[in-house]
Amino acid sequence: MTSFRTFTELVLDRAAELGTEDAFIFLPDDANGSVPEHLSYAGLDQDARRIASWLQAHGVAGGQVLLLYPSGTDFIKAFTGCLYAGAVAVPAPLPTEQGQHFTRVSGILRDAEVRAVLTDSTNAPEISAWLASEGMTDVLCLATDGADYGDPGAYTVPDLSPEHLAFLQYTSGSTSDPKGVMVSHRNLLANEAAIQHAAGTDSNTRFSGWLPFYHDMGLIGHVLHPLYIGGSAVLLSPVSFLRRPHRWLKTFGDYGATIGGGPNFAYDLCVRRVTDEQIAELDLSTWGAAANGAEPVRAETVRAFTERFAEAGFRPESFFPCYGMAETTLLVSGTPLGRRPAQRTVDPVALEQGTFGDPQDDGPRRTLVGSGVIHDFTVKIVDPDTRQERPEGSVGEIWVKGDSVASGYWKRPLTNTEIFDAHITDGRGREDAGGWLRTGDLGALEDGELYVTGRLKELIIFAGRNLYPQDVERAVQSTDKALGVGSGAVFTVETDREHVVVVQEVRVSAVGTDLRSVATGVQRMLGQELNMPAGNVILVRPGTVRKTTSGKIQRTLMRKLFLQGALTPLYEVLEPAVRGTVADATGSSLAQAGV
C-alpha cells in the first residue's frame, strides 16, 4: 500500500512530480498516418482540474456522474476530473457505439441516481435528447472536449476519506436491472497494490491495452494502474484491435510496452488473424506479462499463441494467467513472473464429480490452466450448498476476503448480505465471522495454485453429472471447420426432464447449404464422445451469440432468447417437447403484447 489515503491524493502527487512526462499515448483508429495523441501528467492534471471545478461549481461533487465516451483520452480526463472533484464516476458504454441504443444506460442512469453526464461534443446533442426523453431534465450534460467551461484555478481539493466511493463499476451482464459495485478509495488503492505485487510493475512499466475503459480490466488495469505506479500506457480502441489485431501487438516493439492483455479470445484472434508477414514485423521481446483473464484460460490458446509468436520474441514464461472480478475491484490472483503458467491434467469424469483425479493412461483427459497464486487475499473453496470448506484438489465455489473486496452493490442491501457477507459453517451448526464474498465462480486450490473451472450458475447438471458448458462448446466447435471460428452457447431447458441445447455460429461459406450434415455431426459427437443426448442443435449466423464486454459468453441470456423464440436459425433440430416449450413461450409473449 502507498502512504496516500485516497486515489485522488495519489494522482495529484503524480501530476506534480511527473509534469510533462507521458501518462498516455492513444492511437486513433485510422492506421494510415493518424498522429498518436500524447497526454502528459501535467495535461491530464490541467483538464481534470477544469472538469472538477465545473462539477464543484454545479453542486455535483459527492454525487454520481455518468461517463459516456468513445475510446480516447477524453474519458481519462473526465474520470480523473471526477476523482479530483470528489464525485463518484459511473463509467458506461456509449450507446451509439454498442448498437444497444440507450436501454442499458437508462437502467444505469436511474439506478445510480446520476446527477450529471459527461461526454464529448459529438455525442452531447443525442445524449441531451435522451435525457429529455427520459424526463431527466434536472441531470446536467457537459461536453468536456471544449474549453469554455470551468476554471482550473477555482478548483479546490476535496476532503475525502478512504471509505469515500471512487466509482461505481456496473457489471457487464445483460439484464435491464444492472448492479453497480461500490468501489471505495481504500478498495482501489488496495487492489492497485495487489496488481503491483503480482505483476511486478514500477514507474518504468509501460502498458499496452485495447479493452473498453468502462470495463474493470480496461479501467483499473490499463488506465488507473499506470497512474498508480507513475508509469505510462499505449492505448487503442476495441474496434481498432478487432479490425487489426496486429496493431496491438506492434505497440510492444514500437513503444517498448512491457505489460498488457485481455480475455482468452483476444489471443485466439491474434493466432487466427495475424499473418506471417505481420509477425515478421513484430518485436514482442519486451512483453514481460501477457495477462490472460476475464474468462477460463485455455491450454490450447496458451500453446498456440506461444508457438505462433515465438519467432517475434514472445516467451512462454511471459503468459500471465490471472483471476479477478469487479466485486474484488479487479485482480485476485496472478501467475508469478518468470514462471510458465501452471497446467493440471485431470480425469474429466472425476472433475464432473468435483475432484482433481489423474487420468487413466488411455482414458480421456482435460488440461486446466492455473490462474496463479494468491498473496493479498484469503481464498477458500466452499461447497455452495452446505457452505463447508472443501479439501485441497476439490471443486467448489471460490470465496474471497481482502481489502480489495467492495462493500457491495449500490442500493442492494439484501443481495449484499447474501453475496458479500457469506458465512462458512463447520458442518456442526457453527459459523465463522462471515464477511466472505461469494464469487459465483467454481474452482479448486492445489499446491497454492488457483484453478478456475467455470461459473456456478452455468454448470450443467445432467443425469447426475456436472458438465462445464465451455467444454461442451469446445467439443462442438471441433466437429467441423465451419464451426471452429464461431462462438457457441450450451445450456439446458426443462420440460418433463432436462434437455441440453446447443446454439452454435456457423460460417455458411465453408459448408454451403449442407447444414443438416453439420448438425447431425454435432449430435453424433456429443452422443459418442460425451455420452450425452443432444437432440437440440441450432445453427446461427456469426455474431448471434451474445457476449459481455470482456468476451464472456452470455449463456443465461442466450437461453432466454431461445425460449422467447428470438433466435433466427439457419438450421435447427429440436426435440418435440423443447419445440413446444418455445412455442408456448412465444405465444404467451405475443398474447401479452396484444398481438
Image (cartoon, grey):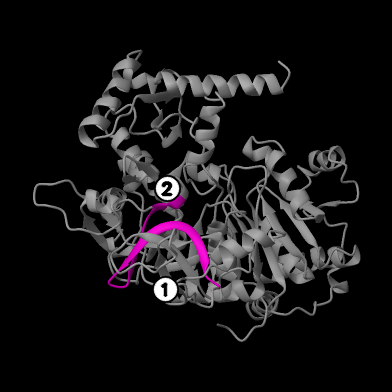
Return the x and y of residue 372 as percentages of the image width and height: 36, 67
Does 450 lie within the magenta span? yes
Q: What amino acid does circle 2 point to?
A: Ala
Find the distance from the CA under tag 2 to the CA under tag 1: 42 Å
Looking at the rendering, the stretch of residues picked out in magenta corresponds to 435-456
Residue 139 in the magenta stretch? The answer is: no
Residue at the spot of label 2: 266
Q: Earlier in the sequence, mark 2 or mark 1?
A: 2
Q: Nearer the viewer, residue 357 or 306?
A: 357
Q: Quadrant of residue 369?
A: bottom left
Q: Which residue is mark 1?
A: 426
Left or right: 522 as drawn, with respect to 60: left
* Residue 216, above or below 332: above
Q: Which mark is residue 408?
A: none
**In front of the other: 239 or 469:** 469
Local secondary structure at mark 2: helix
Indicate left or right for 576 with 236 as reference: left
Q: Nearer the viewer, residue 212 or 413?
A: 413
Nearest the viewer among 219 and 37 is 219
Residue 19 seen in the current view: no
Instruction: Identify residue type, mark 1.
Output: Asp
User: Magenta region's main secondary structure?
Assistant: strand
Above or below for 268 versus 392: above
**Above or below 378: residue 524:** above
| Residue farthest toward the bottom in the current orientation of the protein | 3
Q: Position of residue 263 (x, y in %)?
A: 44, 52
Q: Secondary structure at mark 1?
A: loop
Locate residue 224 relative to residue 511 in the image: left or right.
right
Q: Is residue 493 visible?
A: yes
